[in-house]
Image (spheres, rainbow, N blue to C red):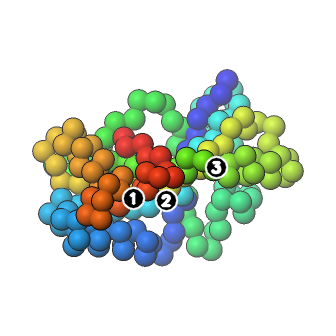
Amino acid sequence: MTYQVELLVRLKIPDVTALTAANALRRRLGYAEKLVDLKRADHYLFSVEASSAEEAEAFVRQLAQKTTLFVNPNKHVFETRVVTGEETIVAQEGIYDVRCLVRDADYDPGEGLRNALSKLGFGDRISGLQTGTLWTLRLKATSAEDALGMAREIAVTKSRNRGLLANPHYQECVVY
């Protein structure tokens, strides 16, 4: 059976790109009262052939640990998660975590990574690999719908003072 497994790779040190984006959103785009935190991660979505979800996740974890294609242990931390398709927005006391996945519309290096994994002997179980950048926004909102709407406004650039995380001319953005 085919399972979708996410691999998220973050820096161990403070991410200056995420800090700069958060600063711009707060100071220049007017989200000082709404944006609690902003995190960024390299996102890899594997389609893995396995007999169980746990086996698929363990395989992706092994790829992250035994190859240097995704994680440099000196500067990165990573997490894996099986995608069920039933993901919901996490909320705690009026703070909502909303995810924005940004991908290039015309180019994805996933196929090249998959070929490299094949040469290393790991490619036989991978039927697909997509890459992107995952932004996680922690937003103060009155409801999940309000948080999603705010994240959509923040994510896609529409003018100099609207949107920041994705350029609609060459990138696609999914907010969830």
Give the mark nearer the N terminus: 2 vs 3. 2
Element type at mark 2:
strand
Residue pointed to by mark 3: 108
Q: Kindly indicate the quadrant of the structure image that contains residue 58.
A: top right
The spot of residue 42 in percent (x, y) is 54, 58
Residue pointed to by mark 2: 41
Q: Amino acid at mark 2?
A: Ala
Q: How crowded is the residue under tag 2: few (<14 C-alpha within 10 Å), some, or many (20+)?
A: many
Query: Tag count in the figure?
Result: 3
| 26 w.r.t. 123: above or below | below
Q: How crowded is the residue under tag 1: few (<14 C-alpha within 10 Å), some, or many (20+)?
A: many
Residue pointed to by mark 1: 165
| 36 w.r.t. 95: above or below | below
Q: Residue at x 68, y 48 (%)?
A: 110
| Residue found at the very far top of the displayed protein | 1
Cα distance in 3D space between marks 2 and 3: 16 Å
Numbered label attached to residue 34: none
